[in-house]
Amino acid sequence: MPRVDPETFTDRDTAPVYIAATLAEARRAEELLTLRGVDYAVQVEELGHTLFGSPRLGATFYVESSQLTYCGSHLVAAGLGVGVLVGDEQGF
């Protein structure tokens, strides 16, 4: 199951699972979630600002809330743990 339009999730309970700070991280997360058969949406969001005041953007990945633990654990196992937004309380 590939990336879906965020509007696909309007009738589902979703939550952010991962924030990619670089394009390479975003591509790795997309590949992993696609291979695992997960429907996910991606939104570009502001992460903060650079030293010179320019906005710093990242890609936030959203999945159904029921898949947070599953997706988070696979992202961590793939070495993408820094951007995972769920953690110890989910048991991984």
Image (spheres, rainbow, N blue to C red):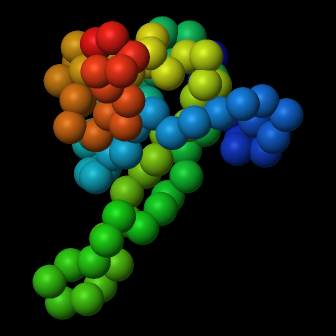
In this view, which residue lies farthest toward the front?
Answer: 89
Residue found at x 45% / y 11%: 70
> In percent of the image, x 18 and y 90: which residue is there?
52
Residue 29, quarter of picture: top left
Q: Indicate the quadrant where residue 48 lies.
A: bottom left
The residue closer to the viewer here, 92 or 23, is: 92
* Percent x, y of residue 91: 33, 11
Q: Is residue 78 positioned above or below 55 on the image?
A: above
Q: Nearer the viewer, residue 4 or 82?
A: 82
**x, y percent for residue 49:** 27, 77
Residue 1 position within the rendered picture, expressed as x and y whole percent measured from the top left:
62, 16
Picture layout, residue 38 above or below residue 87: above
Q: How many marks?
A: 0
**On the picture, is 77 further left or further right than 44?**
left
The image quadrant of residue 40 is top right
| Above or below: residue 50 compared with residue 22 | below
Q: From this viewpoint, is residue 3 visible? A: no
